Amino acid sequence: MRFKLILVFAEDAKTDVIMAAAREAGATGATVINNARGEGLKQKKTFFGLSLETQRDVLLFLVEEHLSRPILERISDVGEFDSSPGTGIAIQVDVEDAVGIAHQAKQLSEIIEDEL
């Protein structure tokens, strides 16, 4: 079984809807890192040196490679990443090896068999 890592950088207000959508698309869970900060094409304005940008979260999904593209597209849709600038981004990278996922492998195998 091969895996992809989907990294999502999104506004914290959208974390719950992104998590729910990813699960519906086949993700079995995620790690959420709070209090991330990012900058886009334009620097955010400050008020007396205090940043006025919204809080960001980083979500890490380890998913089976056959499910990765549908999950990525679903995350993009609910996160509204392509509809307005600054809402977030999501990327996927190949995972060479992973441990600690044996309990999910059986469930993922059944899902993949049904998909193929």
Image (cartoon, helix red, strand yellow):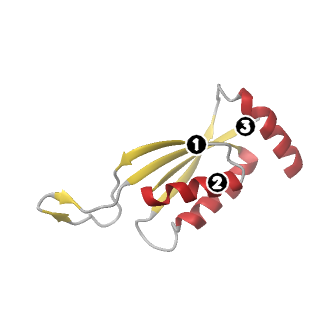
The amino acid pointed to by label 3 is Arg
Judge the density around disc 3: few (<14), some (14-19), many (≥20) Cα neighbours within 10 Å.
few
- Where residue 56 appears, x then y in whole percent? 39, 54
The numbered disc on residue 30 is: 1
Which mark, by number, is residue 2?
3
Compared across the picture, whether 83 is left or right of 107 comes to left
Tag 3, which secondary structure?
loop
The reply to whether callout 2 and callout 1 are in contact (CB within 8 Å) is yes
Q: Position of residue 87 (x, y in %)?
A: 44, 65
Cβ atoms at labels 2 and 3 below 8 Å apart: no
Secondary structure of the residue carrying tag 2 is helix
Q: Secondary structure at mark 1?
A: loop
**Disc 2 residue crowd, few under 14, some 14–19, many 20+, Cα 10 Å:** many
Residue plotted at (68% across, 50% down): 68
Q: Which mark is in front, 3 or 1? A: 1
Q: Position of residue 62 (x, y in %)?
A: 63, 40
Q: Amino acid at mark 2?
A: Ala
Residue occupying image coordinates x 30% and y 67%:
42
Residue 53 is left or right of residue 111, and the answer is: left
Residues 112 and 47: in front is 47
